[in-house]
Amino acid sequence: MLLLFCFAILNITRCQETSLLNLVGEKGIYDTEIGYGVSMRVSLSYKKAKSYIGYQIPLKMGSISIELEPDFDAIKHYYKASSISAREGKIYRDQPVIYNNHSNALYVEYYDSPQKRYRLILIIKQEDRTYVIKGFHRGRPEHLLTEELRKAILTTSIGSFKNQEKEFSKVFINDVNSFNYTRDNKYPTEEPDAIVVTVTNFQKGEIQTNDHIKYLENRISSITDSDVVNSNEKLTNGMLYRCLSTNNNQRVMGILLTSNKGDNIIVECVGNEKADIVAVSNLILSQMTSVM
């Protein structure tokens, strides 16, 4: 029994890779800049992400993303072995990294049991910035994507920092209560899947009806001259109504947020036939969590 126990311990230890990694930090001729000055060699099949800095892996439910964190010690603590184990993660790699002759870096791979995702994390402190390169896929640790993502992430090089402007982050004012946003932060937008998001604030009593979904339906159908599909859901302090309408060359999503205090916000996402209007409306809503 003791022999079997020792053998099990040896196997667990053997599963974890802890050797030192030495990354030269030089951009290769086939590397692609992803954002913030960070480059790596990624597959040509990967698709540039629209809601974060990085790439999606089509049809394979995975991604690579680049994030900046303000505190190297805090993010290092978050990804240390005991912290991952506390979050029910099983560690497969926990390796110190020398990046460009500096030791302020580490690499971790682990299976995130609650989320059912295999995660690959490279953290590099460069001057006053902490870069966090994240990969994940929904397969098991031995999935072919593990090796594919690892190869890409370990080609990471950090060049001159370039500030990455977030999509829909610049405001174009219509009037005191109405604002426009676009993905490329230009108005008119120059994106091929052109989308303009208009956010309008209504004071209490400005919308003269109790049938909010009908009001939103009429407003959206007047843009496309087409039928609408609607839905609603209860919020902790109000209601959220949605209307989707499409025709041959337009996609429109209308969102009406009503608060229990009587304030209302209407979000209109108007795009062309290429626009993923549902994804954009969800992104905009995720950025408005504290607006009501």
Image: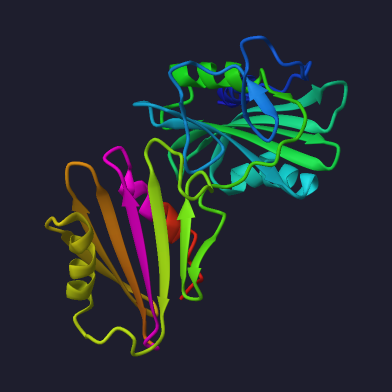
Percent across and percent down for residue 87 are 56, 48
Q: Is residue 234 above or below residue 130?
A: below
Task: Identify whether 270 is placed above or below 116.
Answer: below
Q: Residue at x 47, y 35 (%)?
A: 49
Q: Is residue 151 left or right of residue 19?
A: left
Residue shown at the point (51%, 76%) measured from the top left: 176
Residue 93: horizontal and vertical position, in percent?
64, 26
Q: Which residues are magenta?
A: 261-281
Q: Is residue 25 magenta?
A: no
| In this rendering, position of residue 73 left or right of residue 215 | right
Quadrant into which the N terminus falls: top right
- Residue 159 falls in which quadrant of the image? top right
Given residues 9 and 231, the one toward you in this image is: 231
Query: Which is nearer the eye, 185 or 133?
Result: 185
Q: How is the image coloured?
A: rainbow
- Residue 129 position within the rendered picture, expressed as x and y whole percent measured from the top left: 79, 41
Q: Which residue in the rendered view is the most extreme toward the left?
A: 227
Q: Quadrant of residue 133?
A: top right
Q: Is residue 229 left or right of residue 116?
A: left
> At 84% across and 42% down in the image, what residue appears?
128
Is 275 covered by the magenta stretch? yes
